[in-house]
Image (cartoon, rainbow, N blue to C red):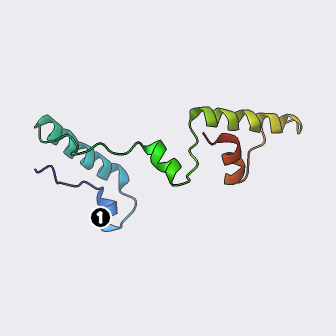
Amino acid sequence: MSDQRQRSPRWARSNVPGTNKADANETGDSILQDLGADRLTAPKREPPALPELLAACGVCVIDNAGWHRIDAAEKERGMSHARPRRKFLSIDDDQRGGCA
């Protein structure tokens, strides 16, 4: 198997959803076989750091600290309604509270 091989689950290749678990196992087994046979090679170049790439594209990244800020804000919103929390209902609200 060459290092040019690309793997994708069968449902992505055939456009038939619903077989994800078996296909994921097949893909994982294939990767492990290649790893065990020393057929995997290091990437030719370093991929860009995902957070920096997303930020450059204007994408809001909600990290673990951001999730905790959202969690705290939802709990605070719920207190005035005698509820454990009051969930944000829009992505904009989540992003305002949680973007890194």
Residue occupying image coordinates x 36% and y 66%: 16
> Residue 7 at what x, y percent from top left?
25, 54
Q: Which residue is mark 1?
A: 13
Q: Quadrant of the C terminus?
A: top right
- Please state which of residues 35 and 62 is positioned toward the viewer in this rendering: 62
- Amino acid on which disc 1 is placed: Arg
Q: Secondary structure at mark 1?
A: helix
Q: Is residue 24 left or right of residue 64?
A: left
Q: Quadrant of residue 17?
A: bottom left
Question: Which residue is at the far bottom?
Answer: 15
Residue 38, image quadrant: top left
Residue 1: horizontal and vertical position, in percent? 10, 50
- Provide residue 24's location: percent of width, then percent of height: 32, 48
- Identify the residue at horizontal 72%, vertical 49% (top origin): 93
Horizontal side of residue 59 vs 18, given as left or right:
right
Residue 84 image point, x, y percent: 79, 34
Q: Residue at horizontal 58%, vertical 48%?
A: 60
Q: In the image, what residue occupies the spot 77% across and 34% down? A: 75
